[in-house]
Image: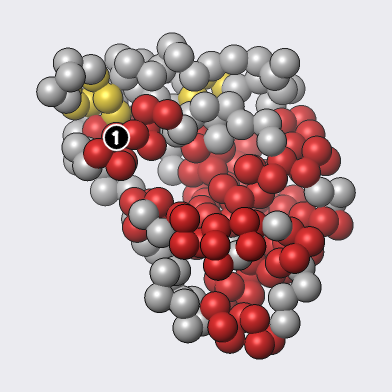
């Protein structure tokens, strides 16, 4: 992820995980989204696809194109995506607002089909959070070099998703997804967000 510092102190006096740097949009993402437990199945589906699109790129690249992705992929409506035609996928390859990668576009369509096969929104959320007993794993890392790129659990989920037909869901992508949607709290212990994002499902 190009993390250069373990913890940085910003002009507002708050300590933050160093990976977010000082770019306002990245800081806002760190402060309002990253690590917040997400239980909405459709939001989880969107984030998993976006993490797949990130493969080989930096997250900030995808973050800054997120609105364009939402528009291009019909708000990540799996019912619509699962029926994308060859013509629609060719149209996406011409869209300058997204990263135009044929394999990733094809995978997004395949993943929408797999998602629906699992039962869609609520079923997908229950599936993912079932691995966590409906509560985040709260880690207490002090330095970014302690944070793993993947874990045995991420590998287990990755293998199962692949069996279910998902693509671009390797262990590193899955663990980045787990961090982002709050399945694990990997904010550094001295980050001002560490204590704020942990909570059980209600």
Q: Is residue 121 left or right of residue 13?
A: right
Residue 20 falls in which quadrant of the image? top left
Residue sitting farthest toward the top: 195
Q: How many numbered discs, if any? A: 1
Residue 4, image x, y percentages? 20, 40
Disc 1 target residue: 27
Q: Is residue 102 visible?
A: no
Looking at the image, is 27 positioned above or below residue 95?
above
Colouring chosen for the image of the structure = secondary structure
Residue 50, image x, y percentages? 52, 55
The residue at 16%/25% (across/down) is: 10
Q: Secondary structure at mark 1?
A: helix
Looking at the image, is 80 positioned above or below residue 35?
below
Looking at the image, is 202 positioned above or below residue 69?
above
Residue 174, image x, y percentages? 57, 47
The residue at 38%/37% (across/down) is: 29
Residue 200 falls in which quadrant of the image? top right
Looking at the image, is 73 positioned above or below residue 1?
below
């Amino acid at each position: 992820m190009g993390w250069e510092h373990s913890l940085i102190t910003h002009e507002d006096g708050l300590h933050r995980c160093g990976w977010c740097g000082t770019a306002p949009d990245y800081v806002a993402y760190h402060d309002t989204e990253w690590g917040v437990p997400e239980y909405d199945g459709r939001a989880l589906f969107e984030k998993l696809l976006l993490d797949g699109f990130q493969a080989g790129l930096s997250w900030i690249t995808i973050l800054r194109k997120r609105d364009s992705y939402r528009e291009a992929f019909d708000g990540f409506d799996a019912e619509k995506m699962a029926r994308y035609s060859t013509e629609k996928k060719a149209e996406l390859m011409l869209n300058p607002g997204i990263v135009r990668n044929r394999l990733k576009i094809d995978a997004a369509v395949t993943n929408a089909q797999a998602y629906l096969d699992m039962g869609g929104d609520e079923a997908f959320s229950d599936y993912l959070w079932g691995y966590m007993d409906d509560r985040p794993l709260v880690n207490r890392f002090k330095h970014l070099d302690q944070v793993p790129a993947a874990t045995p659990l991420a590998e287990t989920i990755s293998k199962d998703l692949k069996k279910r037909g998902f693509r671009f869901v390797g262990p590193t992508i899955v663990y980045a997804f787990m961090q982002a949607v709050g399945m694990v709290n990997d904010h550094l212990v001295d980050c001002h967000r560490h204590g704020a994002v942990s909570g059980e499902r209600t």
